[in-house]
Amino acid sequence: MITKENKTNLLASKQHFEILDGLRGVAAIVVVIYHFMEIAITNYNKNFLSHGFLAVDFFFCLSGFVIAYAYDSRAPHIGITQFFKLRLIRLHPLVVIGSVLGLITFLIDPYSDLYEVYGLGKTLLLFLSSAFLIPYPAMPERYTNLFCLNAPAWSLFWEYIANIFYIFILYRLGKKSLIVLVAIGAACLCYVAVRATNVGGGWGGQNFWDGGARVLYSFTAGMLVYRLNWIIKNKSGFLGMIVLLLAAFLVPFNDKYNFITEPILVLFYFPFLVALGAGTVLNPKFKKICNLSGEISYPLYMVHYPFVWIFLTYVAEVQPAASSLWVVIPVSVLLLILFSYLVMRFVDIPLRKYLKRKFLIDNRL
């Protein structure tokens, strides 16, 4: 039961980590650029951003920190049902929006005839699997992604799994038990790195369980940073933290050593960055930028890939010169950032406000 006293405590203002919000936006932009670049430069050893996919592990770690910070003290009061409502309202509208965009681009892609191949029935199944986050790796033409209409939804699937475990188990764990779980996650991640020679799986039917290892470690590690109060006071500021974050994604790709370098970044560097980002000082002139960056990060992540599929078929069919791609990619990224802002401003935010009014006990939660 949420009593009046508990409700007052729940609604009390808490510190907001603006720089972590800003870094989330930077990581989302990195993911978008990475998805274009891996199509333009298929040889990862020659791709300067070939470790951009590790932004997902940073997201998971950041999510663990933020969820623990936001809900550890509230979870016993708001209950399981209210928690699920809060998380679904926050996350799922953009899952559906991304699925709708994925369906539209699947139907109108001028460089592809995939709809003629799969037909109405299977296309409907592809859409429903994406909209309801039910893995359906049915398209070899799209590398058997778990969600073929909107590939990044794979990480939302694992985020949901982490949230379910959080409200049923994780928030109840003491520090020692959480440390043990983090150690188990680290062992699983190292096993994946050695077996697969990297930690980049989880997105497809062929590497499904790798995603479980990634979220198990990074989400619980983020929780542990919060629980143990590993907040490192420093003066790096927003710009300094951007440099430190980008350094992880710019680590050279090397087939011989990825199984070592990638776990080091995920196991140690990203939790360290979260601890630094939570403890650094924000220059007031960057406050609005950080807030906007944080707000646009999730919309950008969830709406960009349907257009990347068109870019993929464009490159395959037209085979444009490399010089033209260096124009197409930056322009596409900028347009997607603008488009994401519009989706956030005119679709996602109004929809979430409506859902809060309709389904929450108190829509200020």
Image: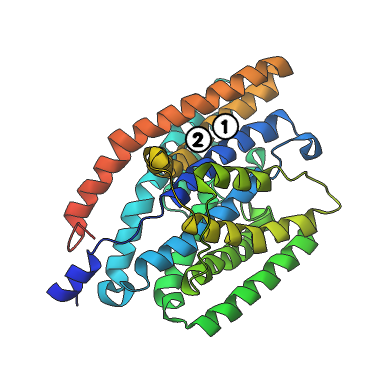
Nearer the observer, 261 or 231: 231
For residue 203, side relative to residue 254 (left or right): left
**Residue 71: quadrant of the picture:** bottom left
Mark 2–mark 1 Cα distance, whole angstroms, equals 7 Å
Residue 34 versus residue 206 in the image, above or below: above
Let me know if residue 189 appears in the view: yes
Kindly give the residue lying farthest to the left in the view shown: 4
The residue indicated by pointer 1 is 308
Let me know if residue 145 appears in the view: no
Nearer the observer, 340 or 270: 270
For residue 211, side relative to residue 194 (left or right): left
Residue 168: percent from left, percent from top: 41, 76
Q: Quadrant of the N terminus?
A: bottom left
The residue located at (56%, 36%) in the rendering is 32
The residue located at (54%, 24%) in the rendering is 332
Residue 248 versus residue 210 in the image, above or below: above
The residue indicated by pointer 2 is 304
The residue located at (31%, 35%) in the rendering is 345
Q: Are marks 2 and 1 in contact (CB under 8 Å)?
A: yes
Label of residue 294 in the image: none
The residue located at (15%, 75%) in the rendering is 5
Nearer the observer, 283 or 131: 283
Residue 278: percent from left, percent from top: 47, 58
- Find numbered disc 1 in the image and state the secondary structure of the residue it sits on: helix
The crowding category of the residue bearing disc 2, from other C-alpha atoms within 10 Å (few below 14, some 14 to 19, many at least 20), is: many
Query: Which residue type does callout 1 highlight?
Result: Val
Query: Which residue type does callout 2 highlight?
Result: His
Residue 8: percent from left, percent from top: 17, 69
The crowding category of the residue bearing disc 1, from other C-alpha atoms within 10 Å (few below 14, some 14 to 19, many at least 20), is: many
For residue 98, side relative to residue 328 (left or right): left
- Find numbered disc 2 in the image and state the secondary structure of the residue it sits on: loop
Residue 301: percent from left, percent from top: 49, 42
